Image (cartoon, rainbow, N blue to C red):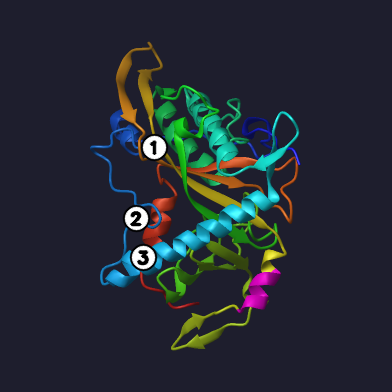
Amino acid sequence: MQTRGFLTTFSLGLPRFSSTSTTSSLTPHQLLASYPIRLRPSEAVDRPGYFERYPPGTSLLERGLLMPFRLQLAQMAGKGFLNNRINADTADGRARDFFPRQFQKGVSQALPTLFNRLSNWNGIDDNKSLSPLVTPDLLSAFSKSHKALKASGHSLSFRYKANIANLDSTDTFPIFPTNIWLTFGSPQNATSTLFRGPVIDRNHLIIFTRRVNTPKTPDGPPSDRRVFREICFEYVYEPHELRSEFDDGKEVVVPDFEWKRSWMDKGAKVGVDSVVSGSTLHYKLTRDIDGVLVEEGHVDLAGMGIRMESSHFIDEFPDNGVWRIADVDNCLIAPRVLEEERPPILSV
C-alpha cells in the first residue's frame, strides 16, 4: 500500500477560528516568554516529558531494570504495529518499513512547514493552513499566543534551519523517535493521544485510569470517558462499557485481556514522540505599525520534543490517512505528565 507524504495527506474541514480579538496587559516580551515553544530557554520553566524522571521513592530495581525493560517491549510492539499497518513503497515498487525511516523523513518535512505557517500569523484566520498541519488542541495554544501578540500590535516570524545534508540518509535525520503510543477505542471516543484528566485509580507507576471530560467534537458538550493506560498503550471507553468496582470511595478498574483485545478491534490513533537534533530556530518580533524590530534571537532546538499523531484507523492505515503535529516542546505533554504524578482523586 502506498503511503502518501506527510505534507500532502492533511485533511481539511476543521472549524475556523472566531474573529474575536484577544486583549492582554502583558508586554510583548512577556508574551514571548509564554509562547508554546520556549524561545528563551534560560528563562523558561521546566517541561518534563515522558519517562524522563521517576517519583520519589521509586526503587533502583524499577529505575534501572524493570522500567527500561517494559519500555523496550512496548516500543518493539509499537514499531511492529506501525510497520504491519503502514507500508512505504520504494521507487521500484518493493515494500519497505514505514518506521522509522519514512516517519523521520515526514517529520523532517513537517517541522519547517509549521514554522513557515506560524510566521506573521494573526492567530485568527486560517489562511496559513495550520489546521491541516496540527491538532486542534495545539492549534488552540498557538492561536492564543498569536492573537495576544497581534492585539498588542506585534508580529512574530520564524526561520527554521536543519543542519542536514541528505534526507535519504537515516544518519543525518534531525528527528529521533523515542516513544510510540497506541490509543485504542472507537473513532468517536479515541479522538486524541493526549487526553487530559485526573487520575482516579492507579495500579502501578505506569498503569492507571484517568477521567476525561474533553468534548468529543470541537465546540461539543463535555464527555464522560475513561482512559486506561498500560505503559504506552491506552484504551478509551465510557464508564458503562467496563465494569468497575469501588474501594474506599475510589473507582477501581482492571480490564482483562479479552476486553483489551476487543478494544483494539475498534481501531486506534497512533502518537509518536521524537526528539529534534541539529536544528536551530531564528525568530523576530516586529512592531506592526512601523516594522521596527523589537526582539530577535536564535534557539537551539536540540532536545526539543515533538509528537506526531495519526488519524484514527482500523486494521490498515488508509491511503487518505493523515498525520498531524500534536505537540511541540512538551507544551501539552508536560501538564499531562504533572497531572499523572499527582495522587489519584476520589471518583465522582
Q: Nearer the viewer, residue 184 or 334?
A: 184
Residue at x-position 50% and y-position 62%: 73
Label for residue 37?
Answer: 1
| Magenta region, residue range | 256-262
In front: label 2 or label 1: 2
Label for residue 341?
Answer: 3
Label for residue 52?
Answer: 2
Amino acid on which disc 1 is placed = Ile
Amino acid on which disc 3 is placed = Glu
Q: Can residue 25 be seen at all in this image of the molecule?
A: no
Residue 336 x %, y % = 43, 57
Closer to the chain start, of discs 2 and 1, is 1
Residue 175 x %, y % = 46, 37
In front: label 3 or label 2: 2
Residue 153 x %, y % = 39, 23
Q: In the structure shown, which secondary structural element does the residue marked by tag 3 occupy?
A: helix
Mark 1 crowdedness (10 Å alpha carbons): few <14, some 14-19, many ≥20: some
161 sits to left or right of 137: left
Q: Can residue 66 be seen at all in this image of the molecule?
A: yes
Q: Nearer the viewer, residue 107 or 237?
A: 107
Residue 229 x %, y % = 52, 67
Label for residue 107?
Answer: none
